[in-house]
Amino acid sequence: MTSRITLISPAMNRSLRETRFDDGCPLDPSGAARAAAVAGSLRAADRVLVSPSARCRETASALGLSAVVEPELAALDMGRWRGLTLDEVMGREPDAVMGWLTDPDAVPHGGESVRGLCERAVRWLEVAGGSEGRTLAVVEQEFVRAVVVSVLGAPGAAFWRLDVAPLTATEVSGRGGRWNVRLGRELGDGSGGGQR
């Protein structure tokens, strides 16, 4: 049995524009409009899931998806850095930021490590991979990174080398724990095949 999982990154919001650790900010008008413009461009799925974050839930809604909130798909827990911009944290704690960006086990913010997020992504993939049919999930960019790093068996440091643009699809397919990845397809580019 081949499992097919499509991960959709959320539309643009103020936090993404400002490089701010998610603060529960809603989509901005341009992000919501862009998501609404590509609604209907996704293949039908047997399961539609969404991260608990506001921007993921609003993206799913703008895409016309009736999604179930899945706590395992949550964003990286940024602890006491939540709501701050990267520049603000860098100004206050430059050594902590540099350690966090170079050591996948670092948790200077008191939240979750990159390695912890990758391990959570692997656990979720094991469960999702056991389901027949297609799974579609609207998830934060860092969750997409964690899946790709884990599927490819890349070192944790590779997490920071992956860019995930807003409103793109990353597709993972495979069987028996062996996965293939198709990265960064822009929604509405015509290759999604429309609703089926």
Image (cartoon, rainbow, N blue to C red):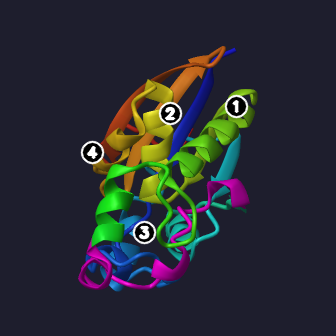
Q: CA distance from mark 3 to mark 1?
A: 31 Å
Q: Nearer the N terminus, badge 4 or badge 2? A: 2
Q: Secondary structure at mark 4?
A: helix
Report the residue marked by disc 2. Answer: 150
Q: Nearer the N terminus, badge 2 or badge 1? A: 1
Q: Which mark is residue 36?
A: 3
Q: Nearer the viewer, mark 2 or mark 3?
A: 2
Q: Is residue 191 magenta?
A: no
* Residue appearing at x 66%, y 50% in the figure: 48
Q: Secondary structure at mark 1?
A: helix
Q: Nearer the viewer, mark 3 or mark 4?
A: 4
Residue 121: x %, y % from top left: 60, 43
Q: CA distance from mark 4 to mark 2?
A: 14 Å
Q: Quadrant of the N terminus?
A: top right
**Label 3 neighbour load within 10 Å: few <14, some 14-19, many 20+:** some
Residue 70: x %, y % from top left: 71, 58
Q: Are marks 1 and 4 in contact (CB under 8 Å)?
A: no
Report the residue marked by disc 1. Answer: 126
Q: Secondary structure at mark 3?
A: helix
Q: CA distance from mark 2 to mark 1?
A: 11 Å
Q: Is residue 88 magenta?
A: yes
Read off the magenta span: 69-94
At label 1, the amino acid type is Glu
Q: Nearer the viewer, residue 82 or 141?
A: 82
Q: Is residue 50 visible?
A: yes
Report the residue marked by disc 4. Answer: 161
